[in-house]
Amino acid sequence: MTSALGAAGELAIRSLIERAPLASSLAEAFKKAGYRLALVGGPVRDAILGRLGNDLDFTTDARPEATKKILKNWAENVWDTGIAFGTVAAKRGDTTVEVTTYRTEVYEIDSRKPEVEFGDHIEGDLSRRDFTVNAMALELTQGTPIFIDPFNGLHDLANKILRTPTSATNSFSDDPLRMMRAARFASQLNFEVAPDVVEAMKSMASRISIISAERVRDELVKLLMSQNPRVGITMLVDVGLAEIVLPEIPKLQLEIDEHHHHKDVYEHSLTVLEQAIALEGRLGGPNLIIRLAALLHDIGKPKTRSLIAGGGVSFHHHEVVGGRLTKERLKALRFSSETIEEVSTLVSLHLRFHGYGEGEWTDSAVRRYVRDAGSLLEHLHVLTRADCTTRNKRKADALAATYQSLEDRIKVLMEQEELSKIRPDLDGGQVMRLLNVKPSSAVGDALDFLLELRLENGPLGAERAEEELMKWWATRAKN
């Protein structure tokens, strides 16, 4: 279906002019070179929804090298890392564009790399898009802009449903990652997924294994950072995709929450994720680290489950096992080492607060809590508060009040002692001078001793620290 603008096209054009005025100059550049250019995919969908951003996707009949030449004359920066797949990217001002030659992209049965063929017609390009709502285009080089919608994407957009342009089986065979995109778009757009698409996802879930870990990771991140990740995660679990890309999550369905707050630990984990999102204002806004930690915080429970005499179950040290499993899973998904370390640290620490009781911790215990959390202290505050999912309001209020008392104590100690900067009262140079030793493991042991002393007693001052160090050194020499 190729039509004159119509109401949807007019809305898209208006949004494009208001939010991305550089698109018209880019279209003019391609037109002068004798090529066609159309805004395509997600930006058209978002323009119709009135939420167009500054990242724009275009499609063209120009071959990649010709596109690169045009962009070099138009943009401030050009990069061609995707040129083998027909894509050249550029940036001008605040606008980033990706221009892709009409193409088809197909994964062979056992191949992890797609085969790309360039085409000459936009309709063929659109037929290979993931979903009908992303298979609309706005032709910009034909005088009057033309709204192109061969698969009734506008209808599906209005009805908030995700369908594939061709059969779902063929679409997911061409690119299995589209199955994860279905879950992601369901979360991002609050759309339903058509029944035939869901059935295809169930029958073809195993095919996701041919997709690289990096691409799977990127889709998972987009899903988690959406407004309603529960929807997408639930879909990944229901169709069997999670068993392959994030198997620790469906395994939680087998574990009964020992406190009987939820039908299983899986439901509890989704609730913790939602509650952590509600508290993200404390972290400055949407935060991947806290969302990953909230989702994964209990994945150590299946491996630590044990029965209690008289009924019930326990999961002793599941936070330790969970921290290790978190590292393994995030490493497999090719997350950065920094992300892996931060998320696994939070998972390992998420139960620490429960030793606080009614506030019996000594100041030294509070100092250790802050020291172990380090730069993640605010994240740990959010995760710990989110982990309270009891339906008993009195108990929930009591837990919140107890944790608030801990935060208040931390604040006071922070003001008194600068807890976030806890260091031994002496530095390495002073230790070596006092002990008359050269750099060695002994210096490290001495600093560890002084740090423990500092954590236990608070600031000692240089004089007392020197006295304690010399006593420790004399005792060490005797042993």
Image (cartoon, rainbow, N blue to C red):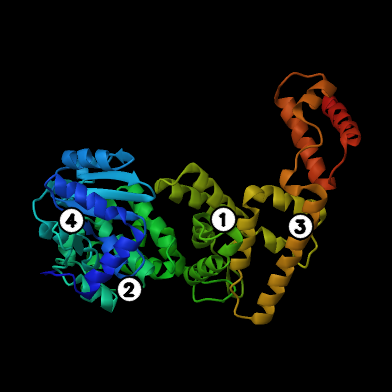
Q: Nearer the viewer, residue 24 or 215?
A: 24
Q: Position of residue 318 (x, y in %)?
A: 57, 58
> Which residue is tagged 4?
174
Kindly indicate whether the residue at mark 3 contacts the one at mark 2 (C-beta within 8 angstroms).
no
Q: Residues within 10 Å of mark 4 (few under 14, many from 20)?
A: many
273 versus 33 height, above or below:
below
> Which residue is tagged 2?
191
Separation of marks 1 and 4 at Cα, in angstroms: 37 Å
Separation of marks 2 and 3 at Cα, in angstroms: 44 Å
> Which residue is tagged 1?
347
Q: Nearer the viewer, residue 213 or 30?
A: 30
Q: Residues within 10 Å of mark 2 (few under 14, many from 20)?
A: some
The N terminus - image quarter: bottom left
Point 29% across, 75% down: residue: 160
> Which residue is tagged 3?
411
Q: Earlier in the sequence, mark 2 or mark 4?
A: 4
Res 108 seen here: no
